[in-house]
Image (cartoon, grey):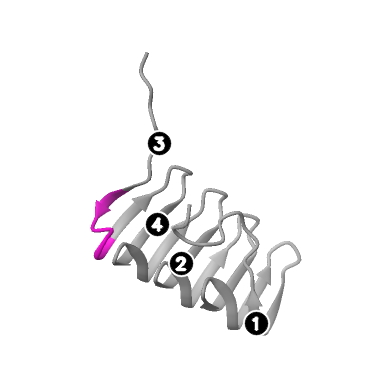
Amino acid sequence: MSASFATAQCVSGNCHKGYGSFSWASGSFYRGDWVNGLQDGFGNYEYDNGDAYSGDFKKGKKEGKGTYIWKNGDKYVGEFDNDVINGHGRYTFKKDDAFSDGRMNNVEIPTSANSAGKE
């Protein structure tokens, strides 16, 4: 009988300092810049629940400008601070073909994977 174990691992490049791709056991995947083993710079994060984030990271958290797309097609394009929506941006509701523009303050991202890389 053989057992297979899913592991979290760097699958290509340098996931400590440089550019690399990292896969978590949950199925989440990150490709982008790393500093001291944390996402730092520009990157693309695909969550195991079908959500995706593309944008700036700082010390393992969403920080700066980015785009978050939920599995249902809703999308936020704008500013992030310390892993939350914070600043000017646009939230587009796919189902209603409507949007909200403006400043949003400390809005938690409703997902099962709130912190990039913290699985």
* Sequence-earlier tag: 4 or 1: 4
Tell me which numbered mark, 3 or 4, is placed earlier along the sequence: 3
Label 1 to label 3: alpha-carbon separation:
37 Å
Q: Residues within 10 Å of mark 3 (few under 14, many from 20)?
A: few
Q: Which amino acid, by three-letter code, is at mark 2? A: Ser
What is the magenta range? 10-19
Magenta stretch prevailing secondary structure: strand
Label 2 or label 3, whichever lies nearer to me, is 3
How far across and how far down the image is residue 67, in percent? 52, 70
Q: Which of label 1 and label 2 is nearer to you?
A: 1
- Look at mark 1 in the image and give the residue it sits on: 105
Which circle's residue, 1 or 3, is located before the other in the chain? Answer: 3
Whichever of labels 1 and 2 marks the residue nearer the N terminus, that label is 2
Name the mark nearer the viewer: 4 or 2: 4
**How far is mark 2 from mark 3, CA to CA?**
25 Å
Which residue is the site of mark 4?
30
The residue identified by callout 2 is 54
Q: Give the amino acid at mark 1.
A: Asn
Q: Which residue is mark 3?
A: 6
- Calculate the distance from the C-alpha at mark 3 to the C-alpha at mark 4: 16 Å
Q: Amino acid at mark 4?
A: Tyr
Q: CA distance from mark 1 to mark 2?
A: 20 Å
Q: Position of residue 20 (x, y in %)?
A: 28, 58
State yes or no: discs 4 and 1 in contact (Cβ < 8 Å): no
Q: Residue at x 63, y 60 (%)?
A: 73
Task: Please tell me which residue is depicted at 61% across the width and 67% down the height of the picture.
Answer: 75
